[in-house]
């Protein structure tokens, strides 16, 4: 099996690849493992297409991910069959079939836990004003691959897989099952993104490919071919043709990648960020008040990396957005003191408003907008803790204001410590350790997860003899403030405090 895949041709000769040959061999061995796993379903599907007189190829990201050893259960196929024929072929075989985009030639199906998207060969033309192509079905797999975004996504493997995986080399088959007209295998070995056509043509057809390039840098650790990077720098403004929803989807994938810092840096260095997250490159101009970093931008990227290191599960989009954006209010709040120091008073307040505005403009879900803005607003609160001078009341308020975001706030605050002074860094971490211990102690003594007045609205109305209305809300908020200041009150204490408040605030 490995022998068969090792014989797959690549565009560059071994001598041209030099020390990349081992990487190619590893990719081919990865593919053996991945293709063996999907072969039962893929070959069943291919047999049905062949019986109907059509070809079927595993294509694009599925081939790339198989070579990288990361193929999941979502598979992409391409075929010369038209959508109606695809639907007929899937009938009686798939566990479920749906219209993923029949106007674009794509039909979705599942079988044995594997999701398949099958698309008719495409040979689209773009008007280069919008992103929407004139959908034209093609006649060859080579023509379909020519319209794809990057060469690493312009490879295909003809099905069935059984001959390839059984050890037969292409020389013993009547055709070459591995289609790589643009050197995708060699580019994958180099971890380089290049385009099948010129990058100017590719990006003019679909400007979202520029942001997708940054996403692949973050997700897969790729670099850009020099001509691709140059074109991105010239054409960055074309991203404005893309709907904000599509931009946000790519940005989220970038931030959830293994190395989002590299993706963000590419966006900033090429000017793409100016049209997606302009607040981020704006931070390059501002010197951090601690003078420990080149600028606020570099500091924010470090905070992003440190926040990621503190994640204890799946990648956290809210935490990563908050880490990247936590200091975006600094440019607008910069002040120079006579002694030469720089301050950014209330930058957390300004930054929270800016983060909310930008994320709304990108049409992020309301809960993401609210949570990121809240974390940006709260991230500086801890620095008032000092040497532990906060009262229990202040600790309660910190916990209550953070609410469900408290675990993320812990991570963000700790990540925000980027000083190179080891002693200072250790002192800050110890201080935050102390705050977390106090939170745990008070939580053990009180129900901090549900801080609420000791009397509810019904009890307030009954005790004061007032009907539902604004006065009940005012009384409730007063009792909640008492609860935060003093902790839980007995029933008698709460009633006495409520009567005292009513005497001063309600009409006779």
Image (cartoon, rainbow, N blue to C red):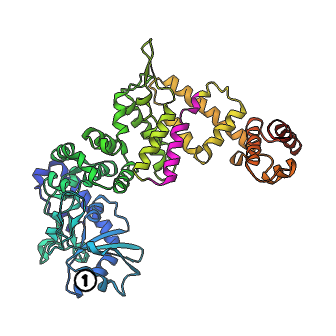
In which quarter of the view is residue 445 placed? Answer: top right
In which quarter of the view is residue 52 placed? Answer: bottom left
Of the pair 479 and 19, the residue shown nearer to us = 479
Does dot 1 land on a helix, a strand or a loop? helix
Of the pair 209 and 115, the residue shown nearer to us = 209
Residue 376 lies in the magenta-colored region: yes
- On the image, numbered disc 1 is attached to which residue? 49
Residue 360 percent location from the top left of the image? 44, 49
Q: Is residue 428 left or right of residue 193?
A: right
Q: Which residues are magenta?
A: 364-383
Residue 283 visible in the current orientation: yes
**Secondary structure mostly taken by the magenta-highlighted segment of the chain:** helix
Q: Is residue 174 left or right of residue 188?
A: left
Of the pair 127 and 373, the residue shown nearer to us = 127
Residue 47 visible in the current orientation: no
Residue 134 lies in the magenta-colored region: no
Residue 134 percent location from the top left of the image? 20, 68
């Amino acid at each position: 099996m490995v022998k068969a895949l090792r014989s797959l041709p690549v565009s560059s000769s071994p001598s041209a690849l030099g020390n990349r040959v081992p990487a190619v061999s590893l990719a081919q061995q990865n593919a053996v493992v991945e293709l063996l796993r999907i072969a039962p379903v893929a070959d069943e599907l291919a047999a049905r297409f062949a019986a109907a007189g059509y070809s079927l190829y595993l294509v694009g990201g599925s081939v790339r991910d198989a070579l990288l050893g990361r193929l999941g259960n979502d598979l992409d196929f391409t075929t010369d069959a038209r959508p109606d024929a695809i639907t007929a072929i899937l009938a009686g075989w798939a566990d479920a079939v749906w219209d993923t985009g029949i106007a674009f030639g794509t039909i979705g199906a599942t079988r044995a836990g594997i999701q398949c998207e099958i698309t008719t060969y495409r040979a689209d033309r773009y008007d280069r004003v919008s992103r929407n192509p004139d959908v034209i079905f093609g006649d060859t797999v080579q023509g379909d691959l020519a319209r794809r975004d990057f060469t690493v996504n312009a490879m295909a493997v003809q099905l069935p897989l059984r001959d390839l995986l059984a050890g037969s080399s292409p020389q013993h088959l009547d055709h070459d099952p591995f289609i790589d007209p643009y050197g995708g295998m060699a580019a994958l070995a180099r971890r380089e993104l290049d385009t099948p056509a010129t990058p100017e043509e590719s990006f003019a057809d679909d400007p979202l490919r520029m942001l997708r390039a940054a996403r692949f840098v973050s997700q897969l650790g790729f670099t850009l071919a020099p001509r691709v990077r140059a074109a991105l720098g010239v054409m960055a403004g074309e991203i404005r043709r893309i709907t904000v929803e599509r931009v946000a989807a790519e940005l989220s994938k970038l931030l959830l990648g293994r190395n989002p810092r590299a993706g963000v840096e590419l966006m900033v260095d090429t000017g793409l960020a100016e049209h997606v997250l302009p607040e981020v490159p704006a931070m390059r101009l501002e010197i951090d008040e601690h003078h420990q970093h080149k600028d606020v931008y570099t500091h924010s990227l470090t905070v992003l990396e440190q926040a990621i290191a503190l994640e204890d599960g799946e990648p956290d989009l809210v935490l990563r957005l908050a880490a990247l954006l936590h200091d975006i209010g600094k440019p607008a709040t910069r002040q120079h003191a006579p002694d030469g120091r720089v301050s950014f008073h209330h930058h957390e307040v300004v930054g929270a408003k800016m983060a909310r505005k930008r994320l709304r403009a990108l049409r992020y879900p309301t809960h993401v907008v609210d949570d990121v803005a809240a974390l940006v607003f709260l991230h500086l609160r801890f620095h008032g803790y000092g040497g532990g001078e906060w009262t229990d009341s202040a600790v309660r308020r910190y916990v209550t204001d953070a609410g469900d975001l408290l675990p993320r706030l812990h991570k963000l605050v700790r990540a925000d410590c980027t000083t190179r002074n080891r002693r200072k860094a250790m002192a800050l971490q110890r201080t935050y350790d102390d705050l977390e211990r106090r939170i745990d102690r008070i939580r053990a003594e009180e129900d901090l997860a549900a801080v609420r007045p000791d009397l509810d609205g019904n009890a307030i109305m009954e005790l004061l003899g007032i009907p539902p209305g604004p006065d009940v809300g005012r009384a409730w908020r007063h009792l909640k403030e008492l609860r935060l200041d003093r902790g839980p009150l007995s029933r008698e204490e709460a009633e006495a405090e409520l009567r005292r408040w009513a005497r001063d605030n309600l009409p006779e």
